[in-house]
Amino acid sequence: MRRFRAAAAAALVLVAVACTTQPEAAKPVAATATTTAVTTTTTTTPPTAVPGPGGTTIPVFQHPYEYGTPQAVVPPSSDGLLPVVRRVETDKPYVFITIDDGAVRLPEALELIKSSGVEPTLFLNTKYVDGNVDFFKSLKDKAHARVHSHTHSHPDLTTLGAAGQRDEICGNADYLATQFGTRPSLFRPPFGNYDQNTRRVAAECGFHALVLWTAAVNDGVVQFQAGGKLNPGDIVLMHFRQTFVQDWLAFLNRARQDGLTPVVLDDFLSPTAPRA
């Protein structure tokens, strides 16, 4: 009997153990990855110079305003005579570069102008553009040069009467308008020579100003009509010559030395007033 009770008790113990709920294995906790996005701002400093042709260095100028927007109004005409502009009145450190004629068309000119960030004003003769339109169109379209008038054949206008001057001045404007799609609004007389007939005829042909200069570049040297440096508002003359590379670089280096930025002449001789 005792044995039976002991066996029964043991059996009850086994049943109790078997029926005890086993603890579940701990479930793995999914790790939450926290990603912090890091934004890196890279500031690129615009170049102040780039390599140029023949081992030269081209100074680079940034645009101080949006080119193509009026900055000053052209002086008014008086008594039907075109206003004469020798320099621009401005209190800003700006200078203006103009290039005349078109006689020598060096292939380096386009990249040289584009690389500098400078947008020059061209005063062109029909006799040099004729047959070479593509060269000057590339300067206009790719380097943003402005095209203006310098007569058909580059005569001394003071040796011509009103009719002869009209043929040279208006005819050149008509030709350039046909070739480039925009009629010139600025006129420069060859050699800087003009008379009352010149101013009257040019006004009748639709020009806004007769443009002269205060400094010139020749053989790689900037020459001043007064003083020993470029000043704000100066208009600089150079030409399409064999020395174009040296002349262009001489102007750029002189402008930088004198603390000036070359900007667009058209913007300061605009028929439209600047926005307030």
Image (cartoon, rainbow, N blue to C red):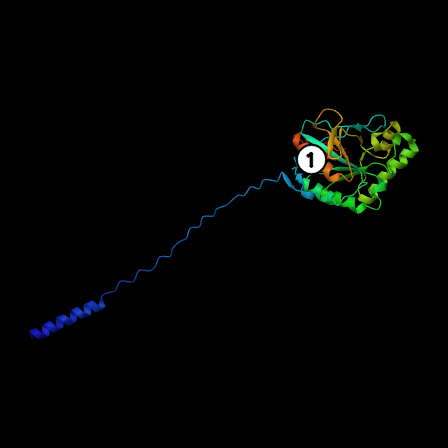
Can residue 19 be seen by looking at this rendering?
yes
Tally the marks.
1
Is 163 on the left or on the right of 255, as rendered?
Answer: right
Choose top left, top right, bottom left or bottom right for residue 51. top right
User: Is 62 or 3 nearer to us in this picture?
Assistant: 62
Q: Residue furthest top?
A: 227
- Mark 1 nearby-residue class (10 Å; few <14, some 14–19, many ≥20): many
Work out which quarter of the rendered image holds the C terminus and state it: top right
In this view of the protein, can residue 261 be seen by the observer? no
Residue, far left? 2
Q: Which residue is mark 1?
A: 252
- Percent of width and height locating residue 58: 67, 39
Residue 80's image quarter? top right
The residue under the point 12% across, 73% down is 7
Q: Position of residue 265 (x, y in %)?
A: 74, 34
Q: x, y (%) of residue 105?
A: 78, 43
Quarter of the view holding residue 69: top right
